[in-house]
Amino acid sequence: MANYNIEVAVTEETSTTERGKLLEDLMHDVFDATGYTSGPAIRVTGMEIDVTATHKVTNEEVYAECKAHRESIPADALAKLLGNVIQRRVNQGWLVSTSRLSKDAEGWKTDWENRPPEERRTLQIYHPPRLLELLINSKRIVEPSNIQVTSGMEHGNWYLLLTKVGRYWANLTPEAGVPTNVTAYNAITGKILDDAELLQRLKSTDTSLRDFNWLVPSTESKGSRESTTVILETVVDVAVGDTWADYRPARPQDFVGRQELQNSMIVLFSAIRNDSTKTRLFAIHAPSGWGKSSLVAKIRDRCGNYANRNKFHMVAVDMRAAKSANYVSAALLKCFSLAVQREFILPPVLPLQAGTPTAPLESESMQDCLQQLRATGKVIILIFDQFEEVLTKPELRELFDRLHLLALSIDAQKENVALGFAWKSDAFLPQDHPAYFLWHQLKDRRLDLDVPRFGSRDVSQALALLQAELGQRINPVLRSQLVQHCQGFPWLLKKLCIHVFNLVESGLTQSQVLERGLDVKALFEADLSELSNKEMLCLKEIARLAPVEWVQIVDQFGNDTYTSLLDRRLIVRSGDRLNPYWDIFRDYLRTGEIPKVPVSFLPGTEVRTLARGAAVTIASGGKGVSVGMLSKSLSINTRSAVFGK
């Protein structure tokens, strides 16, 4: 019964008492089918209820806990129940759960069932497969395989929905391998539901099927189906620039620095491959423009190089392309499909299909793939880049919920699959946002990786790339200016380097570039050319008040305007305060004038040596002197002669 699931289908406003009544009714059926008489509920808390029952013949007493959660049941819940049985001095303890067991709990259950029968009967575990088998065998619900599905449909993933108005089977079927359509049936008779109002009530309940396309039988023909528009998601990979001088994420061959961070990620993937870690989740944090997407692209490239291509398969997708919650299943399906295409794993026996939202890896084809990964010691990695898009857009709340379920599932199963998130740490996420708690709830389950600013070594490597693109050595004074102005921000250094490259390509010498002061006015004018009036007003207000509290700016101009300026990297956030990205840019916004940027350079030779050099040059009568001649005349090395000249 791998494709059978159970969910309590109630609205978010449903009281604890009403939820408890549904669980109590379920427990009554379980007890009655096994020869017990249920007693009153001991405790009702949200989606949990504790009850007792007495056997009709032997009078043995049972203490039972019923849990209706979406996340997997952990092993410690079983151990805790066993402790409660001993403490209450009852004959047996039962766990009745509508959610599946985690991998650890499955291991605990297997170990328990290998114990002697007398000890084993102390604890009974009714997880969905056993619970549904009991309800079907006792004729309380119909077996889904006996339901006559509509022509053109198929038997997909079945959900038993426990509602205040009855029990219903919901059949979730895929389109292009992604779960998409829901058809509902009466769970007792197996008859298809054609009541549009009832179907809408079921769809509006808080279940994992809420966001799918519920099909309504046509009143004219029971064989035809009415449906709403289905959003078929196009999953977009994290893209890189075409050239070095492209402002998009850096090509892997152009990526510099962050070696320690890169190695940490490869070490994590290797530990998963060797089964020496329980961690399956990781997150990459950094402010806007610090190179998160470039880092993701670099790691993707390293996973595919000669040394790693038979160990790791990584797919990185851009969350900015997401339109609906289906994006999660579509991305997962694409990740595994590409692994098959590149022959990283063999095609599964059945067509590749993503699982349900609560069990995304539990379709038969996905299980086939996971078994191959375990047997061959290979790891699949899926990264969602630009994750803050989900956190900051209310219309994508269901998408975040689906991601949350995927993370919980991967963490619980501990298979050879890693899930990563790259997100902007300066994104605005208020504490009352629905995703805030759930995101931080995962903190103790994931490895957090912070991308640092560029250090001096990173800057030197980046300038070496500029030098290679120029085909000439960088003027030492120009190099010094670039180092000083970039302030350790990777995006600002890239911006300045590309600007210098374009000026030199246009025919200017490096000395002329220096004389123009890097032409920062042209840079600033380009920055401002595409802003709306509101964005321009907001930017000037930040410049006027800088540093200014981000809350004040959001209250005055709105989150969309604030986020837009942050995404364009025209402002930077430090803690709770905002500034324009560069002090010179701030002054330009305040006055409209470009401040004088001094060329600060400390000569490496004494002033009297410079004076002697000037005399030698003057004595040449305007013909000039070579570096070699100057070096020889002043008795200094060639490097000092270059600086002096």
Image (tube, helix red, strand yellow):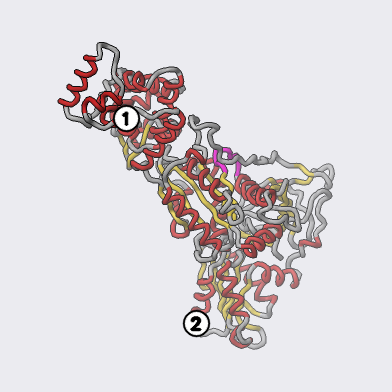
Q: Quadrant of the C terminus?
A: top left
Q: CA distance from mark 2 to mark 1?
A: 80 Å
Q: Is residue 452 above or below residue 471?
A: below
**Which residue sits at x=48%, y=38%?**
254
Residue behind mark 2: 88
Q: Is residue 155 above or below residue 231?
A: below
Q: Which residue type carries mark 1?
A: Pro
Relative to the observer, which residue lies in front, 13 or 521?
521
Q: Quadrant of residue 471?
A: top left
Where residue 370 appears, x then y in whole percent? 64, 60
Residue behind mark 1: 476
Relative to the observer, which residue lies in front, 284 or 600?
600
Q: Residues within 10 Å of mark 1 (few under 14, many from 20)?
A: few
Q: Which residue type carries mark 2?
A: Arg
**Which residue sits at x=51%, y=85%?**
89
Q: Is residue 319 magenta?
A: yes
